[in-house]
Amino acid sequence: MSVIPRGPGATAWSPETVTTDPYNAETPTAALSEPLTPAGALFVRDHFGIPRAGPAAWRLRIDGAVRTPYTLATDELAALPHRELDVVLECAGNGRTLMTPTPPGLPWGRRAVGCARFAGVPFRLVAERAGIAPEAVEFVFTGADSGPVRGRPTAFERSLPLSAALHPDTLLATRLDGAPLTPEHGAPVRLVVPGRYAVADVKWLVGARAVTSPFEGVFQSEEYVYVDARGTAEGPVTALRVTSLITAPGPDEDLRRHRETVVRGRAWSGAGTPVRRVEVRTVPEDEPDHEQDGEPGGWREAELEAPSGPYAWTGWSFRWTPRSPGRYRVLARATDAHGETQPERPVWNAHGYGCNAVAAVDVMVV
């Protein structure tokens, strides 16, 4: 195991450290404005430290409720058909610090997210070669990382129902942003499950076993589950919730009255569900019930860009010419094709997962 240092040599495009051992870091603000997040800027989530295993030593064991268990090596994986997908990667705890009271866990702001280009082999090609037993209901994926959880030695494991595990877009990914995976992003092979929170994307993958009953491991039934959720069904976190972020203007940025400002951002939802609408509202700090441009409620539609794929985020922009000086709060909310809209306030739960409240940034008009 090792820690990746982030010291004086870090740049505006380096992830911003949240914890050092294990290393966890948020995507820098500058990188969120890009359609695809550069690999070197993408947020990092690590529980136990980064295992070191080169491609030559890597093996994936496929076993459990299958007819022919076997072990897959790097050269065999490389010989199989590959796919490339642009995928929103978001930690389930993204935005946790916006909840009141703040739940325990990593103190993520709203930047434990990015949109990355992954290439790899559909897992179904590997699983079908083993011959999945009719009674199998899930695959449990095991990473090479492990450590103590509540005093118990624990491997990082997470399961997927067969419908998700065998989806043609669920990948054994070996490349990120056109280059081999780096250690902090799961090298040499990680799972990528588009449309789900990134806990499903098991890094440093070494095992995939078919099981005949739902998996109840630590990271499936104790961690990464909705507990004491207000208005949310309890159980494991799964699909991404519809969410947006504002990339410009930045917090506390000075804007000029009577001068047009372009408000920009990103929006996404889960399971390949497209974003259908993003709305923006600008509210003077001293007039929270202010009507924007004479419209009750003040929500106005932004212009949407075409996403680079079904699992990528959607860029959006909104032109705003402030008329009066003062401090303003700029708000943005997204709605997806299922009609789900971001709530005004975070929906609280005991572990702080799935925060998708309306995005907000405060600016000064002078």
Image (cartoon, grey):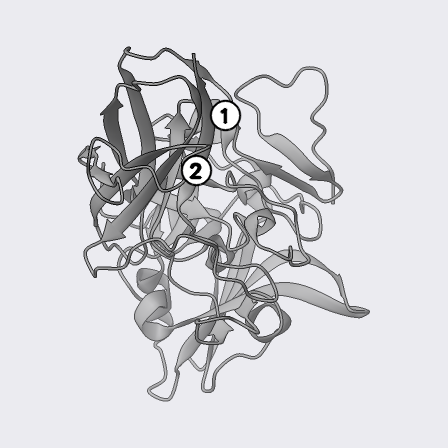
Q: Residue at x 59, y 44 (%)?
A: 108
Quick one: SS at disc 1?
loop
| Residue 242 against residue 153 in the figure, above or below | above
Asked whether, in this view, residue 338 is left or right of residue 114, the answer is left
Return the x and y of residue 340 as percentages of the image width and height: 27, 59
Label 1: how many Cα within 10 Å (few below 14, some 14–19, many 20+): some
Mark sitting on residue 251: 1
Residue 165 visible to the viewer: yes
From the top left corner, tell me how far across and down residue 121 is, in percent.
Answer: 34, 51
| Lower position in the chain sequence, tag 1 or tag 2 | 1
Specify the amino acid type for callout 2.
Ala
Which residue, given by chain and number where applicable, does mark 2 sit on? 360
Type of amino acid under label 1: Pro
The part of the image, by quadrant, that contains residue 119 is: top left
| x, y percent for residue 94 | 52, 48
Residue 353 versus residue 114 in the image, above or below: below
Q: Which residue is found at the position 31% from the left and 20% from the top?
A: 322
Q: Position of residue 335 (x, y in %)?
A: 25, 51
Horizontally, residue 84 falls left or right of residue 104, namely: left
Give the residue drawn at x 41%, y 40%: 288
Residues 327 and 17: in front is 327
